[in-house]
Image: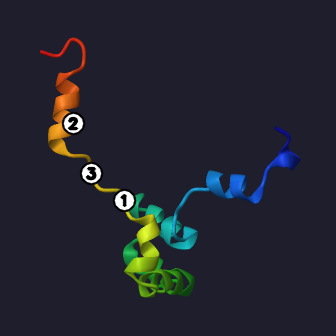
Amino acid sequence: MEVNALSREDVLAATPSVPDHVVYRAFVRMMNMIETPEQAFSQPRVLLHALRVWLRGKRRNAVYALPPPPDRAAVMAACAALPGSA
């Protein structure tokens, strides 16, 4: 497939589904101890983007929610059915 043949859907499917890259980058900087939460959220851009995501509500943010975990009994049964498990 040529690069010119890529559609908009192909490009969107390849992009990560992070709700907001500004907030994500601030979070990563805090996790890597590059800056404190106070430093990150003192930046107006980060604060405004975080508030926008927070205020749009649970229903619109549900797209980014984690899927429910698998059933424990089903996982244990699948592990027990593997060859070589006793």
| Image coords of residue 69 (percent x, y) | 27, 51
For the residues labelled 1 and 2, the Cα–Cα distance comes to 18 Å
In which quadrant is the C terminus drawn? Answer: top left
- Under mark 1, the amino acid is Leu
Can you say whether 23 is above or below 11 in the image? below
Instruction: Report whether residue 39 is seen.
Output: no
- Under mark 3, the amino acid is Pro
Numbered tag placed on residue 69 in the rendering: 3
Numbered tag placed on residue 66 in the rendering: 1
In which quadrant is the N terminus drawn? Answer: top right
Task: Out of 22 and 43, give the one closest to the viewer.
Answer: 22
Q: Nearer the viewer, mark 1 or mark 2?
A: 2
- Return the disc, 2 or 3, that comes first in the chain's sequence: 3
Numbered tag placed on residue 75 in the rendering: 2
| Image coords of residue 76 (percent x, y) | 16, 33
How many numbered dots are placed on residues in this image?
A: 3
Check disc 2 and report its element: helix, strand or loop: helix
Asked if residue 45 lies left or right of residue 41, the reply is: right
Q: Residue at x 50, y 85 (%)?
A: 52
Check disc 1 and report its element: helix, strand or loop: loop
| Image coords of residue 3 (percent x, y) | 84, 45
Can you name the residue that lies furthest to the left here? 86
| Image coords of residue 4 (percent x, y) | 88, 48
Residue 33: quarter of image:
bottom left
Asked if residue 69 lies left or right of residue 35, the reply is: left
Task: Out of 1 and 38, give the one closest to the viewer.
Answer: 1
